[in-house]
Image (spheres, rainbow, N blue to C red):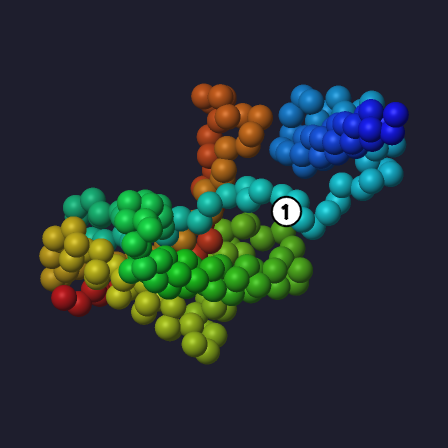
Amino acid sequence: MKKPVYEILSCLCIAAFLVYWSIIFILVMPSNSVKKIISQHSPRFKNTFGIAWTLFTPPNTCNDRLYFVVRIINGHEKPDTIEVLENIALQKQAHAPFNQKENIIDHLVNNTVSNIKLMVWYNKKKPVVDMPGISDSLYIANAIAAVEGRQGYSAYPNTLTNYCRIILRQKKINTANKEIKIMITEKQIRPFKQMIDSNFLQKETLVFETPYTTLNP
């Protein structure tokens, strides 16, 4: 007699477990119609169990972009613009699992970009508080100027410039009489609810840029 009871209890426990985690999964997803329905009709669920867990980190809203803009010194031709980070990610995928070289490059370049961004955003907050109402481009310009005066800053653009030389060598682009500008931007990720919206434009925001500097061969 006890065996059927245990089987029923086991099935009920498994069913409750699956329902609970299914609801949790839906509630931590990006905005969608099912999430709205559950949130409206089951407020007690959120109040009782709480969904503000650090385990479920919100997804990133943008991707980093690193550009090398290369042009002839005092020339009038259109400069060559090379995006770097996406190509590094593709190289890692192409050479996996034997991609130790690509992993090292990824770690070095992405860490440099992240460190520059942290310094810029930290310095950007200061004028926002002290001088409200200034245009965003001026906030960024002030932040970049503050970053350039920081001790140890020169190592970051030097690292990216050296990697630029490697990229140009791989692409067989002559570096003689050339100058380079480094740009870091944040490109907006298409939201889940706008995946099929053909009119959605991914905004790209400038984070950091250097003036043109001579790229010695």
The amino acid pointed to by label 1 is: Thr
x, y percentage for residue 163? 27, 62
Measuring 82% from the left and 25% from the top, which residue is drawn there? 4
- Whether residue 144 sits left or right of residue 86 in the image: it is right
Query: Where residue 164 sits: x, y (%)?
Result: 25, 59
Tell me: 135 left or right of 212: right
Number of numbered labels in the structure image: 1
Horizontal arrangement in the rendering, residue 8 relative to residue 27 (left or right): right
Quadrant location of residue 30?
A: top right
The residue positioned 47% from the left and 74% from the top of the image is 150
Q: Can residue 74 be seen from the camera position used here?
A: no
Furthest residue in direction bottom, as rendered:
151
Question: Looking at the picture, how far across and down is residue 39, in whole percent?
Answer: 78, 28
Which quadrant of the figure contains the C terminus?
bottom left
Camera-nearest residue between 73 and 170: 170
Mark 1 falls on what kind of element? loop
